[in-house]
Image (tube, rainbow, N blue to C red):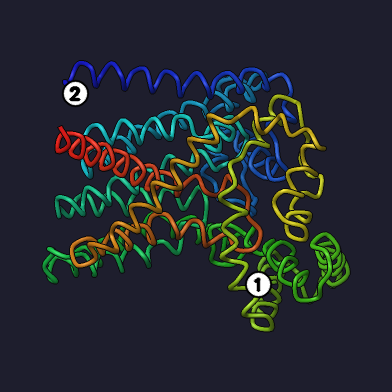
Amino acid sequence: MNRKKAILLLTVIFAAALLLRLIPAVIAAGFPERLCRPDTPTYLEPAKAMLEGRFSGTGRAPGYSWLAAGMMWISCQYHILLLAIAGAVFSTLTLVPVYCCTKKFAGRSAGMIAAALLAFNITAMANAPMLLSDTLFGFFAAWQCCFFLYFYRRKELKYFFLCILTAAAGTLIRPINLPWIAPALVMLWLMPGVAWQRKITASLGGILIFFALITPWMARNAASGAPWCIDTNTGAMLHQNGAMILAEANNTSYEKEKRSIIAEYDRIFKDSKRFPDERSREEWKIAQLRKIIFQHPFIAVKQHFNWHNILLPDAPALFEIAGLTQSDRGTMDVLKRKGLLAAVNHYFEGRWYLPLSLGPLLAVTAMIYLGTIAVLIWSLFHFRRRWYLWLLFLGLAEFYLFMPGPICAPRYQIPALPLMCMFAGAFTVMTAVFLRHKIRNKQ
């Protein structure tokens, strides 16, 4: 494919991606509740406080609130619409690093296929206008993936430092990126073709860059009465992940265990002498969660591998934006107890024609997953030369699928999609080349 055709096709892909994301954003802007989740106020309230010259909360990382504050500064009246449009734009711009790294990794055709797969991915589309941090974080995660792959190909330290800088910026949006510095260093030290002296330089420089960017915010939180952390939402894992572990251990429901833990909060935190500030409350929650994990280690580890929860395409979000379905109906509990089909039937209230109407988009999701699996299997047959592909998958995709733990949502897969789309794009081109070669041999 020549350059002009490639540019034209890329323009069409980007335009289609933007349109598919802007339409639901504009439609739902008149119904803000459709773009919200229970977490949404924890981002918007700090943004409002910023405009008033104060920002005393420690409950969330500041990245998305900064974006929300910017939209509110432009227009308080239309900030919901502006935020939804901003999400659509960031989601579309995520195609840029996906195309760039795939082109570097497997060629221009693979890059266009990878970009198209992400453009028509249901989860990316549906969550683009949502008033949550996932899409913004996904944008930074895509550049993080892109820079690391450029470093893998070119072995130039500037790309590793750019990767770490982007990862640190992403940490200020979603703290799940905080531990990513560890797999980054593992991938660095196991990378072939890089002298150990340069690995030492990259490690020290990367650690310095990473913590130089996030430490000031952690210090600010500590000065505000919280632990040294990006946010104090980590403690909420007690009534989320902890409740899910206890539900399986006690053979009860997730909702029951969650209500029990929250009732314990209400009772024990009344003791203002024992729990005078956010730090003491957060430390108690984390200690209790750690206790539950140590009591049920096998269940905790097993639930981290419930990939079917996080890999489900987020069709529900798309229908909720359209006003055809509603969230928070206990579907997660049904999924946990009765399985996928029962959960789909429960959520859609028997209206199977709704998910089936998304057949082509569901096929795109299947292509991404099957392409990723195929590349990993192919690499096993060429393990001596391609073993590093598994390390890339573990560090740039599986990390984000594993970290959420027992409580996860389809939108948590967004930071893993860039590498998965890249693998799927590469596999599609490999398959096309193989078939073309077979046809020519027969002729």
Query: What residue sits right under mark 1 in the picture?
Result: 286
Name the kind of residue labelled 1 in the image.
Answer: Ile
The quadrant holding residue 411 is: top right
Q: Nearer the viewer, mark 1 or mark 2?
A: 2
The label on residue 268 is: none
Give the number of callouts. Answer: 2
* Secondary structure type for disc 2: loop
* Secondary structure type for disc 1: helix
**Residue appearing at x 60%, y 23% in the figure:** 25
Sooner in the amino-acid sequence: mark 1 or mark 2? 2
Where residue 261 sits in the image (x, y, percent)? 81, 67
User: In the figure, 109 relative to 221: above or below?
Assistant: above
User: In the figure, 104 relative to 214: above or below?
Assistant: above
Q: Residue furthest bottom?
A: 295
The quadrant holding residue 194 is: bottom left
Q: Is residue 398 left or right of residue 221?
A: left
**Residue appearing at x 78%, y 54% in the figure:** 334
Name the kind of residue labelled 2 in the image.
Answer: Met
Q: Assess disc 1: are there few (<14), some (14-19) or many (≥20) residues with their C-alpha within 10 Å of its C-alpha.
A: some
Query: What residue sits right under mark 2 in the picture?
Result: 1
Q: In this view of the protein, which residue sits in the foreground, 354 or 86?
A: 354
User: In the figure, 257 relative to 129: above or below?
Assistant: below
**Residue appearing at x 67%, y 33% in the figure:** 355
Q: In which quadrant will I find the C terminus?
A: top left
Where residue 164 sits in the image (x, y, percent)? 32, 54
Q: In this view of the protein, which residue sits in the foreground, 7 or 150?
A: 7
**Residue appearing at x 39%, y 42% in the figure:** 421
Answer whether labels 1 and 2 touch (C-beta < 8 Å). no
Q: In this view of the protein, which residue sits in the foreground, 108 or 371?
A: 371
